[in-house]
Amino acid sequence: MKTFVLNGWAASEHAWSLCKFGRDRIFSYVEQLDGASEAAMRETDDAVLVGWSMGGSAALGLALQFPEKVRGLVLVATTARMMKDDGWAGMTPRRLAALELGLKMTKGEGFGGLSADGPNPYMMDCDENLERGLDYLRATDLRRPLLDLAASGRARFPVWVFQSEHDGIVRPENAHFLASVFANCRVEMIPGPEHALPVSIAGRIDLAVDEVRRLGLS
């Protein structure tokens, strides 16, 4: 059984350097947009998917495409819909624009809230790829397909969700939506506003991946 990690928008592999769980591959957001993670799923028999932020959304997309191959999900600061709309607690376009500007101003040196001596999960990339990622965040809406998947009874795999209680990028209400979709779902709320949870709670993510892998093998 493979373990695939799907990284967040504009994040480097260093985001996962404190996590010790075994993984077969980390897919950058550019690789996700280019279809590399989909190709990997087609070539494997089964996999546990670990996704953070935009990568969590991509992991949900893979679960929709390959529910028979997914043995478990670990979703970190993950949402089925990034942007705010009627009845949905998401980001406003202004907040997303501020996030984009902040990334450019820091030149990949990270946003506030990260420890000074920890790995930096952010890196600058070419403007074209950053914009492609932004387009994905603006447009992607997996709510209806996920509800349909839940109704079909095909989402029996274990799911573990990590969500900060005051995350300004992915709203905490999203975790409750995911819990309503997946019957076998554990939600762990993290105090504070941290979005870069692979850095701040690496050990807890390790335990979750190991447990989901164990359950997926049973």
Image (cartoon, rainbow, N blue to C red):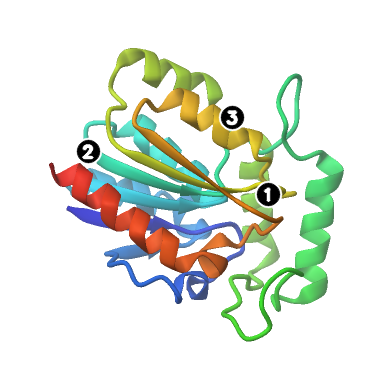
Residue 142 visible in rendering: no
- Choose the circle earlier in sequence order: 3 or 1: 1
For disc 3, the marked residue is 141
Compared to residue 119, the image places residue 148 above or below, namely above
Q: Residue at x 45, y 76 (%)?
A: 17
Q: Residue at x 36, y 35 (%)?
A: 63
Which disc number belongs to residue 205? Answer: none
Residue 12 visible in rendering: yes
Cα separation, mark 2 vs mark 1, equals 28 Å
Q: Residue at x 39, y 34 (%)?
A: 185
Residue type pointed to by label 3:
Asp
For disc 1, the marked residue is 134
Q: Residue at x 34, y 31 (%)?
A: 184
Which disc number belongs to residue 69? Answer: 2
Q: Is residue 3 left or right of residue 27?
A: left
Residue type pointed to by label 1:
Leu
Q: Is residue 151 left or right of residue 100?
A: left
- Choose the circle earlier in sequence order: 3 or 2: 2
